[in-house]
Amino acid sequence: MSAVISLSVFVVAFYFIATEKANKVRVVLVAAGAMALLGLIPGAKVFFSEHEGIDWNVIFLLLGMMIIVGVVKQTGVFDYLAIWAAKKSKGEPYRLMVMLMVITAIASPFLDNVTTIMLVAPVTVVVCDRLRIPAQPYLIAEVLASNIGGAATLIGDPPNIIIGSRAGLTFNDFLAHMAPVVVVVFVVFVLFTRVLFRRSFRYNPEHVAAVMALQERRAITDPRLLARCLAVLAGVVCGFALHAVLHVEPSIVAMVGAGVMLLVSRADVSEVLREVEWPTLVFFMGLFVMVAGLVHTGVISTIGGWTVAAFGDNYFLAATVLLFGSGVLGAFFDNIPYVATMAPIVEGVVATTPDPQTGQALWWAFALGADFGGNGTAVAASANVVAIGIAARTGHSISFWQFTKYGILVTLLSTIMAWIYVWLRYFT
């Protein structure tokens, strides 16, 4: 009975988020509170359990990077990059979108997709404002590119960190098995965006000419501060890259980096904190609590159990179900808590495989489905929520369905390509 109630609360909340009939932060807080009052979440564990509560690593990673971006923003570097990108693309909408997507996709595997979006989204908003074009299509395209690109490495997408830890997979393992299909999917996606966003491409010669006349170097307001900020940011990126060696959580790296950034910049702390997307952080906390209700009452494990029972000894079928199932469920339940919940179930299935190669194939199918499923809806991945928060804050609001109508198509395309890749590489 508790499982039915928790699922009902989640579905009702998701309905209000999807239809935007109520503010999403209010919805998740009410839903989380309802689950607590009804005893559907594990009491105090919701604040302390990594698998049945709020994932503080994600929350503090976001907070740290928001503070870092808030300081960097004061140097004028975002204006510089915006003018540079606009001039290099000559204001041609599709060329500009491709440039921004390529930058995003290259950075995501090494910075992680959430951090990349925090850095690229402000640049995108500025360049679109300069060219007097809507920023929403460009932001959506960047998020989709980020989730695809982030799948290539161990640190590029938070679910990969969870899977790598559980399966004992290294940074090089991810690079060898995930990067090839990610490159192919991204190339196809870039071509697909020409059709996907064709109605959004606008070209205004007058505004383009005005931007082409600008001197991007003049946008840098404080070169010395920029040099210090870039040095700290480089240290943070190195910390992320050395995660597997240092055994320091990315959230700790981000928070230390934020503290150092505030020290070396001597920025006004209260002013920087105003740049933090507090509603986004609260939304994530509420969403984690909602998912914790599904985990604690056995909803997700039951779904996983049914999936495992259907496999038998057909491991290609198992890979297929994991890939497409993760793509669907990861899109609706947020792929971070979903992967944390399903990883032990996948580990159990892998233990029954006849050889290590088949077992690894199941892990790769699971990772690809969860990562690409992150594009499925507006709340499917951390990067999606962060980008929508930035868009709303800068006056370029993106609705749930405005994002999702593009995300579903990209998820379907990328998942099918991933399935073909898994079949050809591991089962033929």
Image (spheres, rainbow, N blue to C red):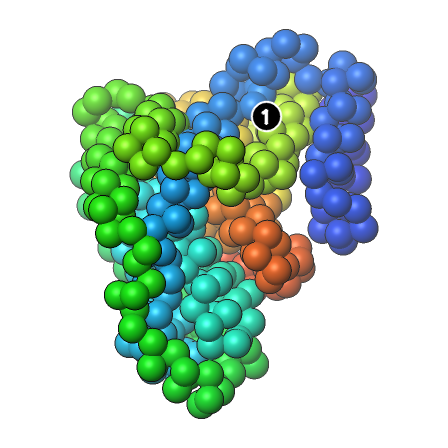
Looking at the image, residue 338 sits to the left or right of residue 189; the answer is: right
Looking at this view, is 392 or 312 the one in front? 392
- Percent across and percent down for residue 221 are 32, 55
Q: Quadrant of residue 54?
A: top right
Residue 114 visible in the displayed image: no
Residue flagged by tag 1: what amino acid is it? Answer: Ser
x and y, in percent, of residue 269 in the image? 46, 32
Mark 1 crowdedness (10 Å alpha carbons): few <14, some 14-19, many ≥20: some
Residue 343, compared with residue 275, is above or below; it is above
**Residue at 73%, 30% in the rendered image:** 29
Asked if residue 156 lies left or right of residue 57, the reply is left
Residue at image mark 1: 301
State the residue at coordinates (51%, 83%): 202
The residue shown at (50%, 70%) is 129
Task: From the top left corner, tell me how far across and down residue 416 is, in percent.
Answer: 44, 59
Pick the front one: 307 or 310 = 307
SS for dot 1: helix
Q: Relative to residue 411, is residue 128 depicted above or below?
A: below
Could one spot residue 50 in this view of the protein?
A: yes
Horizontal side of residue 23 vs 252, given as left or right? right
In percent of width and height, residue 63 lies at 47, 33
Furthest residue toward bottom? 205
> How many marks on residues?
1
Is the residue 245 above or below the residue 272 in the image? above
Side of 191 where 290 appears, left or right: right
